Amino acid sequence: MIMQDTTAYIEDVLKKYLPKKEGYQKIIFEAMEYALMAGGKRLRPLFMYEVYVMFGGTDKKVIEPFMAAMEMIHTYSLIHDDLPAMDDDEYRRGRKTTHIVYGEAMGILAGDALLNYAYETALSAFDNTCDTKNVIKALSVLAKKAGVFGMVGGQVVDVEMNAQVPEPVVLDFIYRLKTAALLEASFMIGGILAGATEEETEALEMIARNVGIAFQIQDDILDVTSSTEVLGKPVNSDEKNDKTTYVSFFGIDKAKTDVKKYSEKAEDILSGLNVKGDRTTIKKLIESLIYREK
Amino acid sequence: MIMQDTTAYIEDVLKKYLPKKEGYQKIIFEAMEYALMAGGKRLRPLFMYEVYVMFGGTDKKVIEPFMAAMEMIHTYSLIHDDLPAMDDDEYRRGRKTTHIVYGEAMGILAGDALLNYAYETALSAFDNTCDTKNVIKALSVLAKKAGVFGMVGGQVVDVEMNAQVPEPVVLDFIYRLKTAALLEASFMIGGILAGATEEETEALEMIARNVGIAFQIQDDILDVTSSTEVLGKPVNSDEKNDKTTYVSFFGIDKAKTDVKKYSEKAEDILSGLNVKGDRTTIKKLIESLIYREK
């Protein structure tokens, strides 16, 4: 599949795994769909799927629940991040944020609902395979990378650092956990479910970590160099929020150099992998992240 | 074990499964502990454990991760329920609520952290047993009863009904999902992990549903008949919040009769079960709920 086709396929997978909009609690199904189907790059399920294919995985019924679960976890984190007590954002991807449309209480609950539903969805993979061992491994990776030793841990330190200037080692911690952790899980789960070895899974984790950090630095760069029209969200938001970023700390030149450095590191590890499938799709995906404009 | 001993044992289990308070994200571990170790009746893990024992379960390493996970899910729901956008409560169990102590952003994140960590914790049961099939079943029950078809679904309708008078059928839906669902999961998981049959698991679900609804009606009764000192939280909060409860809808007399009715129904199903162990502990626990004063 070429990349646009894969993104369309992912949108179909997401829709398929959303609950039907019916019953007394219908409003929460609508809010979940509103948040989940808001577009976006679908980077995490995209990488998960392509890594799965690269390692020779063929059974979509096993990988799909995890693709959907991953995007649900990413989406819940965005909903909660946008809340007034957090980043207080009214727009995301050019649309009103979930709590603006459905109210703050329902925004909190829609986030909770998507996080929990991610596990319901991922657990459904057990129904579709006898390969219980790898599904258990994949679930453990998902839970660890989404939680206090992964994404949530990064958010916590990010919130704590608000308006303070963090040490570079803390900035690295935030980027690694807040942004890279879910990408790490996506790469690792794609590999695990296709039967990757421990060693290969560790290599995948390292590729994703470098991609994640590069991605976040590029995000910081775009926040100062792009426009609201192109990004679909306000630019200069970091400066307005007194937020220290890679760019404000190291300057734009080093930021640009390091995006390249981290991406090349990721591609180096990728080249060293001994895989069944073609690695050019992953390579192209990584490169599209470096040269992206939004 | 007598009941106080079991509660002390559960406190130990909870402490054991909490993450160490170290690292850059230390504050979130503190907030999780603050919320989780705030006392309370520990009803859900208590029932889970006692049902497990009643069905002949002996391996604590299998049930403990689920006991801890269940209380983490219950606790996350309380943290988010207390937020300003939800019930806006400053006190719970006589102590300041989590967002009052740690700030609103950290309150949101502490809830997210506990929900996700519940799954990390429950998944660790796979490391302690070869009985993969029942752990998978237990995980599915946990996820379903905690989510949009369980507790979160109930919270959603509860929030939507705020200051409206719901139909009795909707009030029943809220009580069944918001309060009973996690009790249902606790009973079911206790049974499943001890090897209960499908039929027995269904009976356990029904016992818990009746106990849950009785428990919630008793809660409504205490809100109008108790004192802040005894309850550890403000009384008459439902009236102040214009909230329709079983008491405001049906009156205190029918409420009291129905607590008894639901409890007796639960005990009837319990008597019909063919179990290895002694059922008097569960029976006593149910009765202690009816006659409780806080």
Image (spheres, coloured by chain):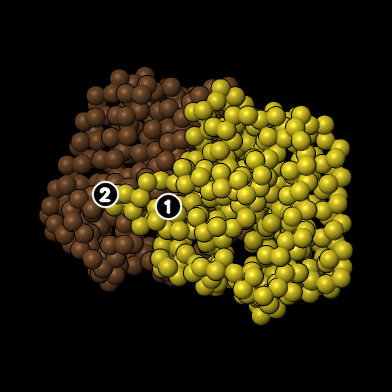
Chain colours: A brown, B yellow
Res. B177 image quadrant: bottom right
Q: Which quadrant of the figure contains the N terminus of chain B? A: top right
From the viewer's perspective, is the residue at label 1 or at label 2 nearer?
2
Q: Which residue is labeled 2 in the image?
A: A173
Q: Is residue A219 above or below residue B54?
A: below
The residue lying toward the viewer, choosing from A276 and A112, is A112
**Residue at point 52%, 73% (across, down):** B90
- In the rendered structure, the residue with mark 1 lies on which chain? A
Tell me which numbered mark, 1 or 2, is placed earlier along the sequence: 1
* Horizontal side of residue A111 vs A213, given as left or right: right
* Horizontal side of residue A285 vs B212, given as left or right: left
Please, what secondary structure does the residue beneath circle 1 have? Answer: loop
The residue lying toward the viewer, choosing from A73 and B195, is B195
**Residue at point 13%, 59% (across, down):** A251
Q: Residue B144 placed where, x, y %?
A: 64, 45
Q: Residue A262 placed where, x, y %?
A: 21, 41
Q: Determine crowd level at label 1: few under 14, some 14-19, many 20+ residues with C-alpha closer than 10 A.
A: few
Q: Which residue is labeled 1 in the image?
A: A40
Q: Is residue A11 visible?
A: no
Q: Is residue B72 visible?
A: yes
What amino acid type should be assigned to the residue bearing mark 1? Answer: Gly
